[in-house]
Image (cartoon, rainbow, N blue to C red):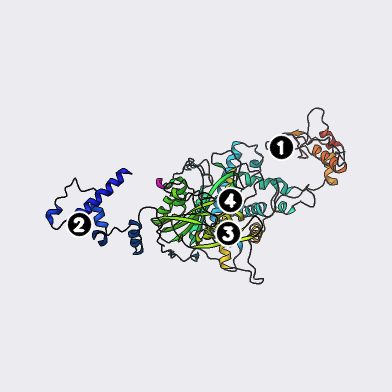
Amino acid sequence: MAKRRAETFTLKQVAAKLMAADDDEELSELTDDDRPSDVESESESGTDEEEAGDSTDVSTESESENASGDELPDEWSSRFQLPDVTFRSVKPAGVQAQFVNCTADSTPCDYLGLFWDDTLCQLICDKTNATAAQSKERNPKDYYGSRWYELMVPELKAFLGVRLSMECCVIKRRYEQYFSSKDGFLTETPGYRKVFSRDRFLGIWKFLHCVDENDPSVDKSDKLYKTKPVMNYIAAKFRDAYVPTQQLSLDEGMIPSKNRLGIKQYLAKKPIKWGLKSFLLCESSTGYVCGFEIYTGKTSGLFVPEIGSSGSVVARLTAGYEGQNYMLYMDRFYNSPALCRYLLERNIFCCGTVMVNRKDFPRQLSRTKKDLPRGNHDYLCKNGVSAVVWCDRMPIYFVSTIHDPTETSSVPRRNKDGSVTDITCPILVKDYNAYMGGCDLNDQQTKLYRTRKHYRWPRRLMVKCLMWCCYNAFVIRRHITPANSITKRKSSFSSFLDELCSELIGDVRSGTPGRRRATASSSVTRLQRNEDHFPERPAEATSNNRCVVCQRKKNWFAKHTPGRKNPHKENKTVYRCAACLVFLCIRPGCKCWFDYHQKVEYWR
């Protein structure tokens, strides 16, 4: 403080000598030692009034400069210059006709084809077939691999339709329950058995891939390499098909998963606490996904040191939207004064909450509930960035490059006695609440069922990508066909998914014949004494084959004596009858082989 006062005194001395100088001789009396280092800058930036001896306050001088349109001072102050936020999009906002060839008569499958088309389906079919062949080669006795046959695009589409219906329409705890006939009439779902047999569905789900893991050209250093082709393909389609309106929101979402993997995250305050964290850039009004990124730790993409890792996520997702005056709303996890300036240099305005301990945030704005009564606010500005504190129940801090911090509005708040009172708030608070919900809207609509077990996270991520494609297709359909032509009601995403699932399944039906009861002729063949009735162990036999006698005895006992403990067990065997082609127990002390070939009702 003493040093600063000394410098001020020296400036006054110099000004006095300059004022008293009548000719060049007096001016030359000032030597280099007497002239302070900042005299030249002060004299160049000073006004005529200062040279005339007027001691105008520095803040008044800066306000006059700001009013004249000059640059704002590089310090936090109460002066603010409202920017020109006119939207200057390179392309008109909305559906891009050169990439979208859909009309009001297009079906949901046509809209989905804008993002998840036959090219992508064929890629998945090829890699899935290759994975199944490799699994069968490694383990010829693999249950699903030994029964595999080639997957084609129509069957893959039917599988995607069935899988979507399991995620959004009919919820059960395990996949096997969709194909079971033992659940009873109330919860039985026979429609799934008509499309796929249980083993075929689970086989496709097991081998579903979009990369060949034995391909040496695959970059396995990327933690997301198993789903990278799908993610890159749909991300480019998202940008081409639709241009968002001016307001954007950026937030994170969770893809539920509890697998053992290094990129799994735990967020205690989220509804979904365990899973893969995704960063979403969405249109605020519709929730259309403009860009996304899956968190994998340290990334090899764009990293800007001055805005940190969270700010670099914003920089990567907003690449391509520079110079168009987009307005970005985000929460305090990303926002900071440094990020605001970084985006402002690229003509992207932003607004959001902020943490007080962010670098370059003005600490003098830090308030307590006692310091700032409810409904009051304070602000400071610097280089076009406004830092605002507003007290609701507790002080809330914002940073914005969009709003005038002096402009206010009101919001209703309920008191302890139940009455409602309008309290004052800055206009940026209302805009933040209005435009921040785009990502939350998308996350609610595309949520995945989280209690069912998924043992391989890449398939889970692929289903999430499919859901994003479905939702973006729904948004584009709402732009082309806002309401039903007859009822005039807006369509919902759930009804869109119902139509889409039915259309994806189409005419695909299960080729596995239904099980039939034993006929008289088959009983005669089974009971006839024939030298062909001998046990064999086929090459495709696995330890999952159940003895038909044990299984029938258990089912018969459970049906006719409900409530009693079942003494029968479904034993597994690798041996079968060479003539009857059914698996039977042949272990010592077991009568299943003899009962099956000697008794008509072998289950009694």
* Earlier-in-chain disc, 3 versus 1: 3
Q: CA distance from mark 4 to mark 2?
A: 75 Å
The extreme bottom residue here reads 486
- Give the quarter of the image for residue 577: top right
Residue 208 visible: no
- Name the quadrant of the N terminus: top left
Q: Give the CA separation, mark 1 to mark 4.
A: 32 Å
Residue 464 is marked as: 4
| Viewer-nearest residue: 453 or 353 | 353
Judged by depth in the image, the label closer to the viewer, 4 or 2, is 2
Q: Secondary structure at mark 4?
A: helix
Question: Secondary structure beneath disc 1?
Answer: loop
| Residue tagged 2 | 19
Q: Earlier in the sequence, mark 1 or mark 4?
A: 4
Residue sitting farthest toward the top: 588
Task: Write the start and end of the magenta stretch as one range.
Answer: 292-306
Judging depth in this view, the residue of 512 and 521 nearest the camera is 512
In reply to whether residue 297 is colored magenta, the answer given is yes
Q: CA distance from mark 3 to mark 1?
A: 39 Å
Q: Earlier in the sequence, mark 4 or mark 2?
A: 2
Residue found at the very far left of the displayed protein: 25
